[in-house]
Image (tube, helix red, strand yellow):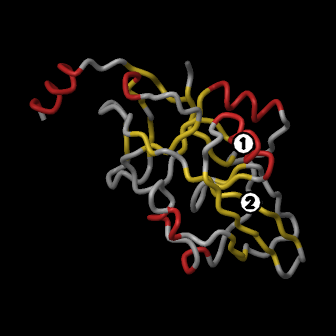
Amino acid sequence: MKYFLLHTDPQYTTAPDLLDWRDKIDRRYIRKGQSYKLPQRELVLIRENPDTVFTDVLSFPFFLVTELGKSVIHLYEPKTIFKELVLLDRANQTAEVYHLPVLDTVDCLSSRSEWNADRSLLRRGVLRQEKLGKQALFFLDGSKNTYVAARLDFVESLLKRGARGVGLTPLELVSEPLECRQEEQHGQ
């Protein structure tokens, strides 16, 4: 099975830019067992722009989807908890409802993955095949930023429904037997 990083397509330069989210959403609580500390619904202001395109996927400052994205997530991960964010551009009187999914976090990145110096930017994602569960969509563990991995069938389902602004970066898969990983750790 193939996997991808799911993010906002960088060609959509006028996707919503959230402004006052730090006062309202604590990123540490966007995980199972902690999400009850987040508000069920929140209003977040976005940068004023008459050309804003409300993409179906937003990846910064955290992963958000529109109703279309939420419906596809429910097909593949029916137990997903969602929080609702209303993104508002007051000056242009536009708003859109987004959903913040609370996904499983999976520790599946291989030591072959490549990062920048402070591990905030994943340059090359390599997944350990034996660590992947059955989740179609999940957070990658081990980064300062939020990275969402999606299985090919989930991505296809999202795109077939006409999702807009979906960026995809292929992830590599490797099989790393336990002995190889232990040797790498001892050799470092």
**5 or 10, which is in the foreground?**
5
In terms of image quadrants, where is residue 82?
bottom right
The N terminus appears in which quarter of the rendering? top right
Disc 2: CA contacts within 10 A as few (<14), some (14-19) or many (>=20)? many
Task: State the residue position of label 2.
Answer: 98
In terms of image quadrants, where is residue 47?
bottom right
In terms of image quadrants, where is residue 52?
bottom right
Disc 1: CA contacts within 10 A as few (<14), some (14-19) or many (>=20)? many
Q: Amino acid at mark 1?
A: Val
Secondary structure beneath label 1: strand
CB contact under 8 Å: marks 1 and 2: no
Q: In this picture, is 3 found above or below 92?
A: above
Whole-percent x, y for residue 67 in the image: 79, 51
Q: In this picture, is 29 found above or below 47?
A: above
Whole-percent x, y for residue 89 in the image: 81, 75
In the image, taking residue 97 as reference, residue 63 lies left or right, namely left
In the image, taking residue 25 as reference, residue 67 lies left or right, namely right
Between the C-alphas of marks 1 and 2, the distance is 15 Å
**178 or 57, which is in the foreground?**
178
* Residue at image coords 51%, 29%: 171
* Residue at image coords 61%, 44%: 79
Secondary structure beneath label 2: strand
Whole-percent x, y for residue 139 in the image: 49, 45
